[in-house]
Amino acid sequence: MNFELADKLDNLLQENNIEVAINIAETKLKELPNSDFHKVLNNDLLHLKSDLSKYLTDFYNSASKFYIGKKGLISSIFKKKNTNPEKGLKAIYSEMNGFTINYDRWFIDLFAYSFYNGLEDIDWLAEFEFDSAKSLTITGFEEIQTTFQDYMKNGMTKN
Amino acid sequence: MEICELLIILRLQQLFQQTFLDAKEKGSEWIKIPILATAHDYDMIYQMKE
């Protein structure tokens, strides 16, 4: 991994400068000899905005109900309202599958937490309490998926 | 390959960023909590928060 570039991109990401990060990464890729990996250039996923919006909204509603249900159970046991007011949906994590080796299908899943522990140490992300029953398939990058398939199977690079 | 990987993740995060901005305009509920996004086995996490 090009750690220097990855660190630079990560810093831009934390500053919400995604467009700048994309431009830098695309410029770096263009400097390399042409390959099938260059098919990623000038391709975005913005056609999935409405699908992702619905996916997040549905998940937020389901996860919220999940935690309300838990609160309700605690309240009913102790016959007291708001026994644990801190319990509730506090964060959502979205993870794309391991795309370099799972080139047949790229997708994202969602995970819910009743706590949020920041980005300093992200081990807590493994401790999700609720997750999406269905994944959202990522479309539009099929050509690049084929590139990863070729690379993993044949160790190519074409061109 | 490595830069291609980083670009795929950034494009995914761009999708989340733009979806978040649309949801903010609509006043969607889910923008009120932190939403984090990356790909499996990558530390480059993007966090959306109102």
Image (spheres, rainbow, N blue to C red):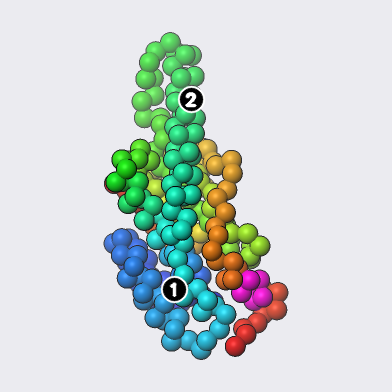
Name the residue located 41 percent from the left edge and 51 percent from the top edge. Answer: B36
Q: Position of residue A5 (x, y in %)?
A: 40, 75
Tell if the residue under mark 2 belongs to the same chain as the one under mark 1.
Answer: yes
User: Per the image, is A149 magenta?
Assistant: yes
A75 w.r.t. B8: above or below: above
N-terminal of the pair, mark 2 or mark 1, is 1
Q: Nearer the viewer, residue B26 or A101?
A: B26
Q: Main secondary structure of the magenta part?
A: helix
Q: Chain of mark 2?
A: A
Q: Which residue is mark 1?
A: A42
Over which residues does the magenta segment extend? Answer: A146-151
Name the residue located 41 percent from the left edge and 77 percent from the top edge. Answer: A26
Q: Position of residue A18 (x, y in %)?
A: 35, 65
- Neighbourhood count class around disc 2 (C-alpha, 10 Å): few under 14, some 14–19, many 20 upward: some
Name the residue located 51 percent from the left edge and 53 percent from the top edge. Answer: A95
- Residue extending furthest right? A153
Q: Which residue is mark 2?
A: A70
